[in-house]
Amino acid sequence: MRVYILTIFPEIFSSVLSCGVIGRSKTRFEVINIRDFATDKHQTVDDAPYGGFGGMVMLPEVVMQAFDSLPDEAKAKVIIPTPRGRLFRQEDAIALSKEKVITFICPHYKGIDERVFELTGAVRYSVGDYVLTGGELPALVMIDAIVRLLPDVLGNFQSAELDSFYGKRYLGAPVYTRPRLFRGLEVPDILVSGDHKRVLRWKMMTGLADTLKYRPELVEEKKLTEEEKKLLQMIKGKKGE
């Protein structure tokens, strides 16, 4: 995979993209400084918004000059992080991990001139119902979620398959490692039983239970398998619902 990133703060990406499994992946990252395409001596990339009410908006001319400099292959799948986009989910990461080239354009200040969205055909994604100072951190969040799903990035891909939201709409199960007893708290017996079928059922049940507890809005019974529905009813029965 090749990932292009257009930003006015390229230094944000250098350390993150070189660390951990992302740094060890075969993904090629190209970070382009939008300021390099400004035409004045101050490298201005923003201006006041029409209609007033404060804030600054990134200039479409400068952003599009940077975008136009990209090879044609980089213009097919374009993403712009914005709180006005749809929520980025695990299924989006899975779908995007199958792309060969992705381009991220990172807004800053009040945002990017709306015409950039129209001219690039960008997909709008939000990483949550809150506002950040720019699109760099959301872009990194999405890049991490996508790249870790590429072949040979994780040492054991089964680790990803058991993640929260992977192929399901509920949270993953709690995880434990050595020692078995730590400060009076012991690892659940089932996890050291060696019975993989029971372990998988336990993971499913605890994941569903945690979803009901922490993210109840995610549980849609019509999207659950028959086994998951049975486990869900057992959990609700224990809670007295």
Image (cartoon, rainbow, N blue to C red):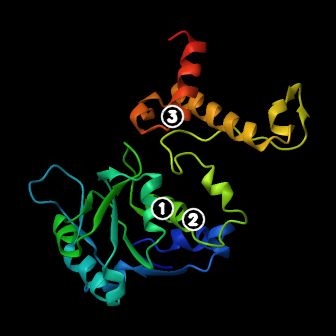
Give the residue type at disc 1: Ile
**Quick check: 189 left or right of 88?**
right
Residue denoted by label 3: 226
Query: Of the residues tagged 1 and 3, which is closer to the observer?
Result: 3
Up the image or down, 169 lies above or below 65; here it is above
Up the image or down, 14 lies above or below 156; here it is below
- Helix, strand or loop at label 2? It is loop
Q: Is the residue under label 2 in contact with that under label 1 (CB below 8 Å)?
A: yes
**Distance between mark 1 and mark 3 Cα atoms:** 24 Å
Give the residue type at disc 3: Glu
Report if residue 38 is visible in the image.
no
- Helix, strand or loop at label 1? It is helix
Residue denoted by label 2: 149
Query: Crowdedness of circle 3 by 10 Å Cα count: few (<14), some, many (20+)?
Result: few
Find residue 36 and report its horizontal and vertical position in percent. Answer: 36, 85
Nearest to the observer: residue 180 or residue 223:
223
Residue denoted by label 1: 94
- Helix, strand or loop at label 3? It is helix
**Count of marks, rendered view:** 3
**Quick check: 228 left or right of 118?**
right
